[in-house]
Amino acid sequence: MSAVKAFNDGLVITKRNLIKIKRVPDLLVFSTMSPIMFILLFAYVFGSAIDVPGTSYREFLIPGIFAQTVIFVSTTTGAGLADDMQKGIIDRFRSLPMSRAAVLIGRTGSDVVNNILVIFIMSLTGYAVGWRIRSSVLDAIGGFLLLLLFAYAISWIMAWVGLMVPSVEVVNNAAFMVIFPLTFIANTFVPTNNFPGVLKDIANWNPVSSLTQACRNLFGNGPYVEGWAEYAADVMTQQGYLDFSPKFRMVRLKVWLRAVANTILDIRMQTMNMTDQEALDLMTKECFQTQAEAEGKLVRAKLSSTQLPTYFVGTRQWWTLRKKYQAAKGSGFTLEEFHDRALDQGPLPLEYLERIILPEAK
């Protein structure tokens, strides 16, 4: 019953905090104006000078703005609690027959609602400047939920800060000194590949970078890089995964046949007027795919062009890059060093990855 009571009391406090936003709309206006300003500033001013290989800068930018904004909005948890402490409201709550956890539950809960409103407004602004969600509905929902979950965790950290420090001003200053560099020494606004050594390490380990990259992947806004998974599976086969199992080898051959079929299917449908029945026959009779799988692939081929061949092309590019790197390194070549060096650059298109790692290998 105590958990239920804490939750119900928390809902009351959440309502109280949301009513405060309604009565003081400046709180919502200023929390949304800042990210809108960042979107417009970076998209139109800095965006013209920043090149992100493999994708447009605006699609690269918006998930980073999302991450930065939900973190900054979450700092209002600490400021709100510090304000309530300063005005004696927390003391009044202590005199009431309510759960002691309700204040924290209500405060963090209201800030989640605030973040939902802010994300909605930012999404509309992003759409206006050219940002698009290019993944599935479920992936997009997952991206928004991940942002809210991360923001909720930050809210609890800021709640602790708000209870520990004496005033709202101190909370705001402390949050600014920590969160501002945390959100800028990351991949929020620019790729980290050209960061100096120490800053690059910090950015790569920064949880904000992980959040931003995860959202880019879920929204379909990252550089479009295919082939690594197929290449990695080929390496596993060559290295004797499952004791050189014939079954695993057959599975790999079937998957590779599917990648080849994808390439043929896309080229013939887009340039040679391949009929639906010819496409289905290719997949089911020559490439051993099920009818359901073939029908789904046919729909994909009609909705997009040049995407299906990327599995085949990307895999071949990885093997070509590996051979070039091995030739440059000579007797000093090892698979582990090559993979570490390549993956350390992040999800770059292989054309740009080759320009980075090949000169260093010589």
Image (cartoon, rainbow, N blue to C red):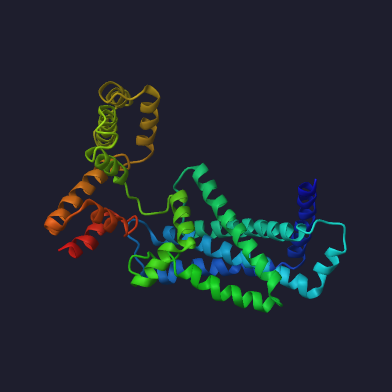
Residue shown at 50% from the left, 66% from the top = 39
The one of 68 and 302 positioned closer to us in this rendering: 68
- Where is residue 228 shown, x and y percent of the image? 30, 46
- Where is residue 225 shown, x and y percent of the image? 32, 50
Work out which residue is located at the far front of the displayed protein and give it: 243
Q: Quadrant of the C terminus?
A: bottom left
Work out which residue is located at the far top of the displayed protein and give it: 285
Is residue 126 visible to us here?
A: yes
Residue shown at 24% from the left, 62% from the top = 356
Residue shown at 54% from the left, 56% from the top = 123
Is residue 79 visible to us here?
A: no
Residue 168's place in the image compared with 8, above or below, is: below
The one of 31 and 304 positioned closer to us in this rendering: 31
- Where is residue 81 shown, x and y percent of the image? 72, 68
Q: Is residue 138 left or right of residue 80?
A: left
Residue 219's place in the image compared with 304, above or below, is: below
- Where is residue 113 shown, x and y percent of the image? 67, 56
Q: Is residue 189 left or right of residue 166?
A: left
Count every numbered label the image shows and give the total: 0
Residue 44's place in the image compared with 145, above or below, is: below
Q: Quadrant of the N terminus?
A: top right
**Splitting the image into 4 quarters, where does residue 32 fall?**
bottom right
Residue shown at 38% from the left, 27% from the top = 293
Q: Is residue 263 left or right of residue 35?
A: left
Q: Is residue 219 left or right of residue 287?
A: right
The one of 4 and 89 positioned closer to us in this rendering: 4
